[in-house]
Image (cartoon, rainbow, N blue to C red):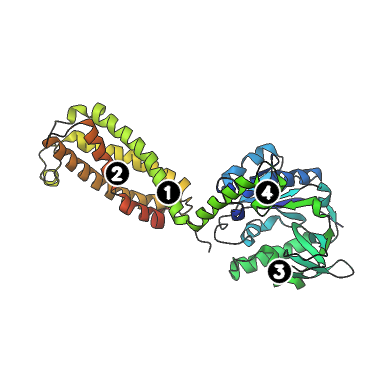
């Protein structure tokens, strides 16, 4: 007889079928009747004396941090591959924790904690007997309740596979080795981890079905199911959100540009405020002071120190804020931050050089032509900030703020 000592909860995915709710909230943290789904899983484990719990996170991972404070025994494991790989990557990063363990999905609701009895003999999956036609993964068992086959496309008169499984010491070690084989050596990053035991290497395991009832666990895969489970998500609002989510999914690049533009507008306001403060407070006395006799600056059309320093320093502030916001919010970049920062600095140096010249050149022109008033100066500053978008967006989108690709 074996006993469960720990649990691994898979919670790294984007939950795209539940967008747009999951655009801001990871699916396991979506509340159903007031409680995040993953908390029902944690509490069911605690009810069975299982406190060593590993949660594999990826998408919006920082939102899971509160669980470490709220519940005893929570450890978060980062999955850097989640965006480009299937869930085999999540179990791969937690492969050292899967002997004598439950493996569960975090985006399900457990109503009956009795299905997580820690005492067991064979490794296997929880399942619900289905005599009717279903499109869920369907397991076939022999007279000893041993799993002998599984269908990805469903069928009838079989056991529906649920995302609750248990693994003894021996099978956990075998599963770990096979995860390393398929993920590292064979590069099969598109697999579900269950493919390994059900289809790739079924001969390596002696698995059983652990019977439960359909009402013991609920898996929510669509807005309609969410609305049925929680009446606060009414059907009309669900349909409206689903339509907006479909637009976002179909026009991801447009959505990125919209966020980039919003970030640009936010940092532009900051830059404009800084510029106005520098131009009319800090460097006010320099607005009529010519730049030291410098052939290069005069050739570029820059004559006054106030305009030169106001454009230069305000641009530095604006681009620094833009870098931080776009990396974290717009592109959610996870590329090497040192390389990213160096590339960004190169782009910014060239852009600030352009801004300083273009702004000071226009500033000199408007002053020499008698248009030197607050409204014109600020409109000129706005123009100087907008023009570089022609090259800064494609550079940041495709070169600087990149997402890592799984090896």
Dividing the picture into quarters, in which one does residue 195 lie? bottom right
Mark toward the start of the polypeptide (2 vs 3): 3
Dividing the picture into quarters, in which one does residue 282 lie? top left
Q: Are marks 2 and 4 in contact (CB under 8 Å)?
A: no
**Image point 14% across, 46% down: which residue?**
300
**Image point 17% across, 43% down: which residue?**
361
* Residue receiving disc 3: 153
- The Cα–Cα distance between marks 2 and 3, rounded to whole angstroms, is 55 Å
Asked whether 385 or 258 is in front, the reply is 258
**Image point 86% across, 59% down: which residue?**
121
Asked whether 179 or 288 is in front, the reply is 288
Residue 385, label in figure: 2
Position in image of residue 113 (x %, y %): 81, 47
- The Cα–Cα distance between marks 2 and 1, rounded to whole angstroms, is 17 Å
Mark toward the start of the polypeptide (3 vs 4): 3
Q: Dot 2: what SS?
A: helix
Q: Residues within 10 Å of mark 3 (few under 14, many from 20)?
A: few
Q: Residue furthest front?
A: 236
Mark toward the start of the polypeptide (3 vs 1): 3
* Residue receiving disc 4: 226
314 vs 266, left or right, is left
Q: Dot 3: what SS?
A: loop
Position in image of residue 93 (x %, y %): 63, 57
144 vs 390, left or right, is right
Q: Are marks 2 and 3 in contact (CB under 8 Å)?
A: no
* Residue receiving disc 1: 258
Q: Are marks 4 and 1 in contact (CB under 8 Å)?
A: no
Q: Residues within 10 Å of mark 2 (few under 14, many from 20)?
A: many
Q: Nearer the viewer, mark 3 or mark 4?
A: 4
Q: Nearer the viewer, mark 2 or mark 1?
A: 1
Mark toward the start of the polypeptide (2 vs 1): 1
Residue 107 visible in the displayed image: no
């Amino acid at each position: 007889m074996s006993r469960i000592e720990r649990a691994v909860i898979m919670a790294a995915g984007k939950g795209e079928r539940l967008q747009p709710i999951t655009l801001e909230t990871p699916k396991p943290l979506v509340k159903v009747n007031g409680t995040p789904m993953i908390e029902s899983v944690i509490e069911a484990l605690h009810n069975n004396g299982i406190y060593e719990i590993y949660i594999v996170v990826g998408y919006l991972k920082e939102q899971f941090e509160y669980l470490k404070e709220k519940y005893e025994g929570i450890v978060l494991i980062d999955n850097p591959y989640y965006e480009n790989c299937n869930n085999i990557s999540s179990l791969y990063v937690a492969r050292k924790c899967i002997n004598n363990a439950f493996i569960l999905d975090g985006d399900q609701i457990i109503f009956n904690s009795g299905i997580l009895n820690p005492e067991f003999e064979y490794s296997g999956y929880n399942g619900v007997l289905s005599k009717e036609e279903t499109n869920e993964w369907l397991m076939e068992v022999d007279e000893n309740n041993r799993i002998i086959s599984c269908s990805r496309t469903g069928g009838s008169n079989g056991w529906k596979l649920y995302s609750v499984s248990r693994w003894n010491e021996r099978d956990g070690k075998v599963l770990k080795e096979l995860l390393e084989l398929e993920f590292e050596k064979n590069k099969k990053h598109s697999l579900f981890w269950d493919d390994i035991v059900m289809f790739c290497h079924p001969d390596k395991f002696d698995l059983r079905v652990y019977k439960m009832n359909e009402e013991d666990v609920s898996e929510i895969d669509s807005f309609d199911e969410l609305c049925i489970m929680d009446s606060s998500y009414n059907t009309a609002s669900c349909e409206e959100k689903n339509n907006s989510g479909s637009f976002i999914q179909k026009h991801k690049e447009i959505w990125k540009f919209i966020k980039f533009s919003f970030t640009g507008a936010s940092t532009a306001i900051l830059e404009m405020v800084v510029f106005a403060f520098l131009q009319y407070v800090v460097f006010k006395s320099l607005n009529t002071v010519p730049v030291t006799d410098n052939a290069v600056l005069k050739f570029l059309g820059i004559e006054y120190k106030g305009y030169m320093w106001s454009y230069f320093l305000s641009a530095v502030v604006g681009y620094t804020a833009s870098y931080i916001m776009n990396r974290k919010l717009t592109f959610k970049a996870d590329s090497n931050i040192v390389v990213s920062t160096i590339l960004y600095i190169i782009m910014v140096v060239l852009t600030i050089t352009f801004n300083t010249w273009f702004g000071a050149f226009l500033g000199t022109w408007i002053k020499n032509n008698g248009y030197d008033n607050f409204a014109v100066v600020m409109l000129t500053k706005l123009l100087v900030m907008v023009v570089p978008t022609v090259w800064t967006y494609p550079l940041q989108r495709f070169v600087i703020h990149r997402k890592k690709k799984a090896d």
